[in-house]
Amino acid sequence: GDPAAASAAPSASGPAPSGAAGAGAPVVLGGAALQPQLDGFLARHEGELVAFRRDLHMHPELGYSEHRTTRKIVDRLRAAGLKPQVLPRGTGLFCDIGPADGGTVALRADIDALPLQDEKEDAPYRSTVPGVAHACGHDVHTTMLLGAGLFLAQQAEAGLLPGRVRLLFQPAEEVPGGALDVMAAGGLVGVDRAFALHCDPRIEVGQLGLRTGPITAACDKVYVKVTGPGGHTARPHLTADLVYALAKIVTELPSALSRRVDPRSSLSLVWGRVSAGSVANAIPDDGIAEGTVRCLDDQAWHAAPDMMKALLQSVASAYDVEASLEYVRGVPPTVNEATSVQMFRDAAAQVMDEEGVVPTPQSLGGEDFGWYLEAVPGALARLGVRAPGSPAEYDLHRGDFDVDERCVAVGVRVLSATALTALWEGGRPGGGEPIEGAALT
């Protein structure tokens, strides 16, 4: 960090960088002009951060194997005078910045990669690890949080941080389960709110997608096994017609589940694999169906296993077969709290263009940040990473996924301003104007 630069509060000069707020009086936060300080910090560190992101992209690591990634983050934080704590399993870490006598805000990034081949033939920072790639932007999330942490450490050194910020560099989001490890290690102890950014290749760089309420879905896996005596297809009446019974289970369970919960919960059971038998003229003695359950409502998510088990037994008994259910919990829905979304909005208004905040749709994809939001209020926002005007249609979890690297600076601005806003505003009710003299003014 550079405490002297923070206390000097350098004035902005020249054109505002990408993602900066428009011209006008400087934003005053706790007596400090935030925008010029961010400008000065990024003028010194943006190149370093982009290089850090590229290094992570070239050396991706899967969940619970992020040893090099963890070491790189720890080394950089220690170089800034901070004291990161590595999680008990050896990957992932958290790090506190600022005084402990105010509120505490957590900022989270996930650090793991995906088991995909990097298909970017011409990128100089293409993955050097066969079959592993940062195809979901976690390298960008990690770098943005590191940058925000270094800036906030600079603020703390200058006495400009009114509370504590906890950086959560979480392992194994894709597994999933890393969020539970962070929580088990005390990562949320004393935390008042938690915030995270996730790359979105559908949104242009310089924009932030916000949504109140559910933004991502719960995602569980289900395994159904059906057994019966088997027999000849010429005499189905003398046995249990297992294939027919399995077909009824596969078709009736999704529709029955949808009638047992509020339609607004968007509870969805979709099968991905069905298998039974090996020849045309023999009724098999067992069969399986595997699928996923996705849901946007926390209450419906908690009720889903028992509902599904009861419905499964009802259908199976009608056809005289035995059915067992293995229900594997994934992640809960990520439900954004209104006040926290407003804090994102207040912060973005100060460090982005007026058109920067855009609505974002719900996704039925899973995100284990939902575990944090079951424990503390907070919000997940989507950060635009698409080059303006680009005809390319990148998506997450694809081998050709890449970002416009100007998003790194935008993310540092948004995370830093959001942490400061949350600390200054405290428990202000959502939907109102910032409090004069206490928040961004």
Image (cartoon, grey):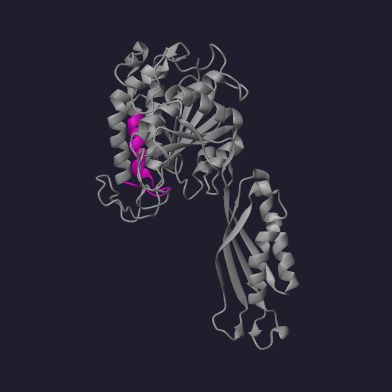
Q: Please tell me how many numbered marks the rendered image carries.
A: 0
Quadrant of residue 306 in the image? Answer: bottom right
* Picture coordinates of residue 216, whole percent (x, y): 55, 44
Q: Residue at x 54, y 34 (%)?
A: 379
Left or right: residue 369 versus residue 130 is right
Inspect this view and state whether residue 235 appears: yes
Vertical relation: 32 (above or below) 170:
above
* Picture coordinates of residue 268, whole percent (x, y): 62, 54
| Residue 76: in magenta span | yes
Q: Is 390 or 348 nearer to us in this picture?
A: 390
Q: Which residues are magenta?
A: 59-77
Q: Residue furthest bottom?
A: 234
* Picture coordinates of residue 300, whole percent (x, y): 68, 48
Inspect this view and state whether residue 102 appears: no
* Picture coordinates of residue 361, whole percent (x, y): 54, 42
Q: Is 122 or 76 nearer to us in this picture?
A: 122
| Residue 73: in magenta span | yes
Q: Residue at x 41, y 26 (%)?
A: 413
Left or right: residue 195 versus residue 409 is right
Left or right: residue 269 versus residue 118 is right
Vertical relation: 338 (above or below) 276:
above
Q: Residue at x 72, y 85 (%)?
A: 238
Quadrant (top left/top right/bottom left/bottom right) for the N terminus: top left
Q: Is 145 or 406 nearer to us in this picture?
A: 406
Q: Residue at x 33, y 14 (%)?
A: 10
